[in-house]
């Protein structure tokens, strides 16, 4: 029987540029095609596949998983396989990525025309529906719980089952239900490791939200302004729903809450694909025709002069790692005052401004000209995480039957190595932390 080649083209011992090729005979498919937002100079893109891919399965729209997709489709004229929300959200993020590259005076790997051409190569797939990829390869997308439309990819090749988790959430959030727990028998598991260290333990969402609201109220009490840095897809919506709930209950002081960046367009897609949301929000949107993301407590920013920084307020803005977008302008205005608060709400990739602030840096350079600013404001991180922590990852492994091999990817190097060692020790399953450029046989 012909071996299956599993090649790691990105996302091995790093967070970013997730890309894996699976090859059987003359058939090659890719799992994700992302970029690494913490790198530059070509190292932010995946390695080239050894053979032209016929299809790219995109687990979700975040740029670390989908950001290189237009370049792959432009070069190989292949098919994108993903859910409808992933396609629409991905298009928005790809356009925004081109704007970011322009801000940084950096060359982009594709054009806006390439982004628009992706739609004509898309194959619309619903959850839990098996599709034939050809050459005896069958595939199915299963809910991963990460963001709107996010999926795991389950492949049947040579009577072997390979499951690629993409980004995985094993608990419910305000917008998403947890990952599908019934994945069937799996021989080879490729699993994310973002929060896989032995001390990675997420507090409950209730604790995170209470700490978030308490910190905001304290900043408001001292006359501060609050800047909430978010990813436009996923984290922004969780933060907005939290603020909406605590404002309505009277726990959060009522001040202007400004929404800036691509969040407005993303919220429209969330409303369009309401059937992918948790049942409580689905019912609200269906029966009231009103999305809680459209609450009247939010002020959408169409012109930045409407944002009054002379009074206490909350600003929710992109990008989530402070690498570009409107958040940079707000950061420049807010960072110098110790009364103010900067909130980081998602994973910060090493090398990004967000990670530098999270690690204690209090002088950072801003694009486009490298202006150095001093950060005197309070900086806090809040784990509005849509990734499973180590206990959640182990629970997922325990529920997955038939495992013969586990590959740990999408994590900082030391985490993936430590994670693989702990899996072998605790779960008695052969586990490995692969290198980028490495090919393994199944």
Image: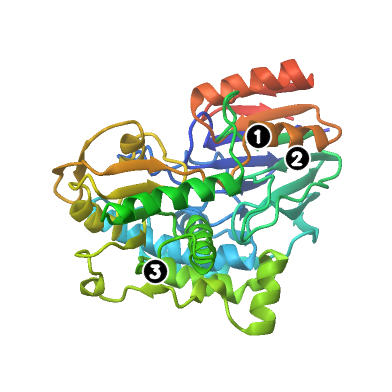
**Is disc 2 in contact with disc 3, using a CB cutoff of under 8 Å?**
no
- Front of the two marks 1 and 2: 2
Q: Is residue 13 left or right of residue 160?
A: left
Where does the N terminus fall, quadrant-wise? top right
Across and down, in percent, residue 223 comes to 26, 56
Q: Would you place residue 385 above or below residue 298 in this image? A: above
**Is disc 1 in contact with disc 3, using a CB cutoff of under 8 Å?**
no
Question: Residue 113's mark?
Answer: 3
**Is disc 1 in contact with disc 2, using a CB cutoff of under 8 Å?**
yes
Q: Would you place residue 12 above or below residue 296 in this image? A: above
Of the pair 282 and 217, the residue shown nearer to us: 217
SS label for mark 1:
strand
Q: Would you place residue 53 above or below residue 396 in this image? A: below
> Can residue 43 be seen from the camera position used here?
yes
Q: Earlier in the sequence, mark 1 or mark 2?
A: 1
Across and down, in percent, residue 387 comes to 59, 43
Q: Earlier in the sequence, mark 1 or mark 3?
A: 1
Q: By what rule are the colours in the image chosen? A: rainbow
Residue matched to label 1: 6
Across and down, in percent, residue 218 comes to 36, 49
């Amino acid at each position: 029987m012909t071996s299956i080649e599993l090649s790691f083209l990105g996302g091995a011992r790093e967070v970013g540029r997730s890309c894996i090729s699976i090859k059987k005979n003359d058939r090659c498919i890719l799992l994700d095609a992302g970029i690494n937002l913490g790198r530059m100079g070509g190292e932010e893109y995946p390695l080239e596949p050894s053979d032209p891919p016929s299809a790219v399965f995109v687990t979700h729209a975040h740029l670390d998983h989908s950001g290189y997709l237009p370049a792959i489709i432009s070069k190989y004229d292949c098919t994108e396989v993903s859910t409808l929300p992933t396609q629409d959200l991905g298009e928005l993020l790809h356009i925004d990525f081109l704007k970011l590259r322009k801000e940084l005076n950096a060359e982009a790997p594709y054009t806006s025309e390439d982004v628009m051409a992706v739609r004509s190569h898309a194959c619309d797939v619903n959850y839990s529906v098996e599709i034939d990829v050809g050459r005896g390869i069958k595939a199915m997308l299963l809910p991963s719980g990460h963001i709107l439309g996010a999926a795991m990819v389950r492949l049947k090749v040579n009577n072997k089952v390979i499951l690629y988790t993409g980004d995985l959430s094993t608990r419910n959030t305000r917008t998403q239900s947890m990952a599908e727990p019934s994945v069937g028998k799996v021989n080879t598991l490729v699993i994310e490791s973002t929060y896989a260290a032995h001390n990675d333990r997420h507090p409950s969402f209730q604790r995170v939200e209470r700490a978030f609201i308490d910190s905001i109220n304290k900043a408001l009490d001292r006359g501060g302004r609050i800047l909430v840095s978010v990813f436009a897809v996923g984290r922004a919506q969780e933060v907005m729903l939290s603020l909406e709930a605590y404002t309505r209950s009277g726990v959060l002081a009522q001040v202007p809450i400004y929404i800036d960046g691509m969040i407005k367009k993303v919220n429209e897609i969330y409303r369009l694909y309401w059937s992918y949301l948790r049942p409580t929000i689905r019912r609200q949107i269906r029966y009231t025709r009103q999305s809680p993301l459209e609450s009247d407590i939010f002020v959408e920013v169409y012109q930045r002069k409407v944002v009054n920084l002379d009074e206490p307020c909350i600003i929710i803005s992109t990008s989530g790692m402070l690498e570009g977008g409107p958040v940079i302008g707000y950061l420049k205005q807010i960072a110098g005052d110790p009364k103010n608060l900067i909130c980081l709400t998602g994973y910060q990739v090493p090398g990004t401004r967000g990670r530098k602030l999270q690690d204690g840096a209090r002088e950072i350079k801003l694009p486009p000209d490298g202006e150095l600013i001093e950060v005197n404001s309070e900086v806090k991180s809040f784990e509005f995480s849509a990734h499973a922590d180590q206990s959640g990852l182990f629970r997922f492994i325990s529920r997955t039957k038939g495992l013969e091999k586990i590959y740990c990817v999408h994590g900082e190097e030391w985490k993936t190595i430590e994670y693989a060692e702990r899996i072998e020790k605790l779960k008695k399953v052969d586990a490995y932390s692969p290198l980028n450029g490495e090919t393994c046989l199944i």
